[in-house]
Image (tube, coloured by chain):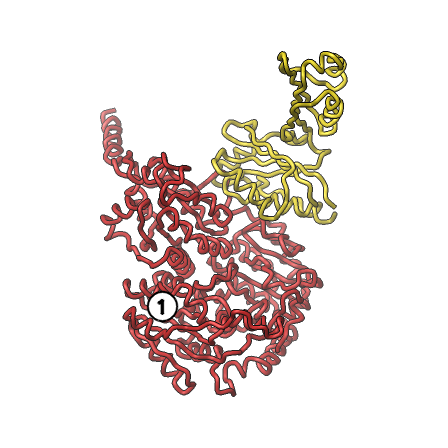
Amino acid sequence: MYTVELTEQETEKKKEQAIQNVTGSVALLDGLVQEQVKTVFGYPGGAIMPIYDALYDFNDKLEHILVRHEQGAIHAAQGYARTSGKTGVVFATSGPGATNLVTGLADAMIDSTPVVCITGQVFAHLLGTDAFQETDVINITMPVTKWSYQVTDANEIPAVMAKAFFIASTGRPGPVVIDITKNAQLQKFDYAGYTKCQHVRSYRPKPIVRKEYVEAAAKLINEAKKPMVIFGQGVLLGRAEKEFKRFIEKGGLPAAWTILGMSAIPTDHPLAMGMLGMHGNYGPNVLTNECDVLIAVGMRFDDRVTGRLDKYAKQAKIIHLDIDPAEIDKNVKTEVAVWGDCKETLPMLTALLETKCYPQWLQKFKNYLQDEIDAVITEELNPSTPEMTMGEVINILNELTGGEAIMVTDVGQHQMVTCRYAKYNKPNSNITSGGLGTMGFALPAAIGAKFGAQDRTVIAIAGDGGIQMTIQELGTVMQSKINVKIVILNNRFLGMVRQWQQLFNDKRYSFVNIESPDYVQVAKGYYIEGNSVSDRAELRDALKKMLDHNASYLLEVMVGKENNVFPMVPQGCSVSEVRLK
Amino acid sequence: MKKEFTITVYTENQVGLLNRIAIIFSRRKISIDSLNSSPSEIEGIHRFTIVMNETLEVVVKICRQIEKQVEVLKVYYNTEEEIVWQELALYKVSTDEIAEKATVERLLREYGARVVAIRKDYTVFETTGHREETDRLIKVLEPFGLIEFVRSARVAIIKTSKGFHEKLKEFEKTEPGEELVENEFLNKRDDVFTM
């Protein structure tokens, strides 16, 4: 009896000790520490000052990277999430601070990137009064967030933070906004410690996999004569790279990736057939309309992948593995849908597969690849013209990095060229804005990517258009001494739009002429070393010097003005109508 | 072929959720014919009843998008035959006009109308029923100077539903049991897409 009483008393005492009277801000930061967050990207302001004040005492536990614009913060958090597989965290103030996040939120939403954004908000009693720097951030961001919540009382903070991290990172990941009024940040309350969220009753991130569908899928694959796998970021998000490799290897299945699925398997894998879609490889595009069973893994049949839908893989039986039930039958109707996490569903499916190979079928891919090499690739990688091509820059980078580097691209021609020609040995190496196509993504995302993979080389590849959208983040690179390599492929045009104007608008070049500053001087202004090359003879050494430099480095490469990216599936055409020129 | 569907959404009671649901429609430029928000058979669980006119395929996609929202527990869609539904309408007419020209008792009997307020200057009638029924009374009252008319959103009961109690128990478990049908649209897809 005595001991029992003592234990109870002790527990009581412990409980009392555990309860601390702290501010909402402290509880919030403790929550981040408990969630193993190491790095926060942010920018202070009036309505988030209490959190920044508390951050002053968390210096040893949390690293804060001061960006130059909130858009930079969220892209950095995205880059961090994509290379580390963890949730990126952003701090921004109310009003303009919060609205500057919108592009990044939309980008993270469409590319399923786990990000938690903490925005400051005016005092609760001022909500709805048009107070200084007040904006209705919850409603502005509603269509581009997986979940959002406004905290007006500090007592809510621990549970809301736990829920935010749980929702952002599980199921199909996505961005979460937590808007915290200033009074809640300042309010002291009894904090009983942080408990991670494991379950939200209205939210089921991981469905029970139905065996009958897996069996039906396996039956279709085993009976196939010309099967083909197309995969997306789901494989990377599910950390199912090994499971996926076993699946295609056992089934002998040729596999092509979407832009976001790239690097889930090494690009030189014998079953790797290249990229799908508008500027993807010739073979996988044409053969999509020839295969008899099409197995889609963790991808969402984006229009840039499918081309014209009513002519997309009509001959094939389609199997779709996805974690998000809303994606199934959304764009392409499937024969068999396997709803679940591919980390779980792929091994189940592999177990039921017969070990097979399809030499004649694979030969078809090889034949198309040869056509593509002859018509496009050779000239792009080893040009006969005096002007440099984007492809040869990537080709030399491949040689110099051995496929070990992380490439972070912006949006446009250079993005397509990089994704077409980059070699990757490791997963999570290709970081790009796929769904939203956000110009200005590369530089800030590369900053975050470096924090997510400290021991790897991170190369931002941008065009002369995109780099000028977020060039202020050179300030972040400077101040936080971030070792990222920045390659600007300068063709003195907004190249992708120019290409379309050439092909479809009769060369009416409308506002695609863009002038650049002296990038080397700009870099110098930020104390970043830089160089510019316009002569092929200097290219290799310049790239090598950039990679060998033990700090950040900016390299501008002057490339051909009017080069086009091919192959191309013109908008409104079927994938089998892909053009080589 | 477009058809009228009634969607029933069980949700947590959360500020802003109505907006999250509404933007799923507005983003796709689909209009909501009627929307009702009310408590459900379970305390703390909210129930939205939404009426829309669309093809089955669109309705299924919309339902999946709604069910994807974190705070939404479950979505059902039903055709008119699968539900029992009612709308309520109020009509304000001049008391003098009614007293002089119409036989109130006849109206009450024929249209199942009730008087909810009688003042010196106006009288308020109420009917519940389907759209045609509430519409019909407008026609009857118009000649007597209908001052105000308003109709409520639709409320509907699903004929085959056993209520949400058992489902909620499953949702509350961290590991759901095998019997839980989490996404009925996927399991129903065979009948859905062979149409």
Question: In this image, B118 relative to A30: left or right?
Answer: right
- Work out whether A366 lies above or below A124: below
- Work out whether A84 lies above or below A12: below
The chain holding disc 1 is A
Residue A462 in percent (x, y) is at 43, 70
Q: Residue at x 47, y 36 (%)?
A: B15
In which quarter of the view is residue A247 placed? bottom right
- Work out whether B153 lies above or below A500: above
- Work out whether A498 lies above or below B143: below
Question: In this image, A348 relative to B99: left or right?
Answer: left
Spot the yellow chain and give its letter. B
Residue B2 in percent (x, y) is at 72, 44
Q: How many marks?
A: 1
The quarter in which the N terminus of chain A is drawn is top left
- Find chain A in the image and tell me its colour: red
Q: Residue at x 29, y 66 (%)?
A: A478
Question: In this image, B137 relative to A158: left or right?
Answer: right
**Camera-nearest residue between A291 and A529:** A529
Residue A429 in percent (x, y) is at 43, 66
Residue B191 in percent (x, y) is at 71, 45
**Could you tell me if residue A93 is visible in this image?**
yes
**Camera-nearest residue between A454 and A569:** A569
Which amino acid type is shown beneath numbered disc 1? Arg
The quarter in which the C terminus of chain A is drawn is bottom right
Q: Secondary structure at mark 1?
A: loop
In which quarter of the view is residue A123 placed? top left
**Camera-nearest residue between A525 and A132:** A132
Question: In this image, B14 relative to A333: left or right?
Answer: left
Residue corresponding to mark 1: A456
The residue carrying pointer 1 sits among few (fewer than 14), some (14 to 19) or many (20 or more) residues within 10 Å by Cα, namely: some
**Could you tell me if residue A252 is visible in this image?**
no
